[in-house]
Image (tube, rainbow, N blue to C red):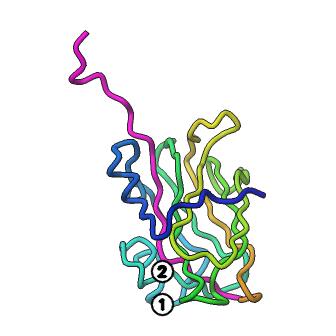
Amino acid sequence: MTTPNKTPPGADPKQLERTGTVREIGSQAVWSLSSCKPGFGVDQLRDDNLETYWQSDGSQPHLVNIQFRRKTTVKTLCIYADYKSDESYTPSKISVRVGNNFHNLQEIRQLELVEPSGWIHVPLTDTHKKPIRTFMIQIAVLANHQNGRDTHMRQIKVYTPVEESSIGITW
């Protein structure tokens, strides 16, 4: 089990983007869910509004599938969860899996969340601390707080490292 990187209270992943070292690439992917209540789906998960959320509507594990058209370098996954607002709908155990497709996913992180409030930054790195290259990311909610059945996730962001460029460098 790994513990997600803790960020300062209210730390927004957009601060990562402002450093110029990463770029959000979720819009380049095809997103799908194992289930959702009408009006609480992918659009709400990706709308940059912390007041909206995805709500599952089925049996666990609840799945978010993020599929890229080509093999993509991914450095960090950011998930917004809010125990105070969502209580028993808040994930307490999450598995992050990567692979080429649904048939060869490998778990690379398992997170235990204790009453999370804010952005959870999950590094997606290999054993050498290098960003992973993958066609697919799957986030599986294995359990919720208070043994809740359905889950809420308010936002998910996917970040790739920005390649360093030699433009502007004189030799």
Q: Residue 61: x percent and y percent?
A: 72, 75
List x then y, in percent, for residue 40: 47, 85
For disc 1, the marked residue is 38
Q: Is residue 164 magenta?
A: yes
Q: Residue furthest top?
A: 171
What secondary structure is the magenta-colored segment mainly? Answer: loop
Residue located farthest toward the front when viewing the structure as drawn: 8
Residue drawn at x 37%, y 56% as measured from the top left: 15
Q: Residue at x 58, y 41 (%)?
A: 132
Give the class, few, some or many, for how many residues have Cα within 10 Å of label 2's Cα (few <14, many ≥20): many
Q: Nearer the viewer, residue 20 or 104?
A: 20
Label 1, secondary structure: give it: loop
What range is drawn magenta here?
149-171
**In the image, is residue 74 above or below residue 128?**
below
Q: Name the residue located 36 percent from the left edge and 30 percent from the top edge.
A: 164
In the rendered structure, are the residues bearing label 1 and label 2 in contact, judged by CB atoms less than 8 Å apart? yes
* Residue position for label 2: 41
Amino acid type, label 1: Pro
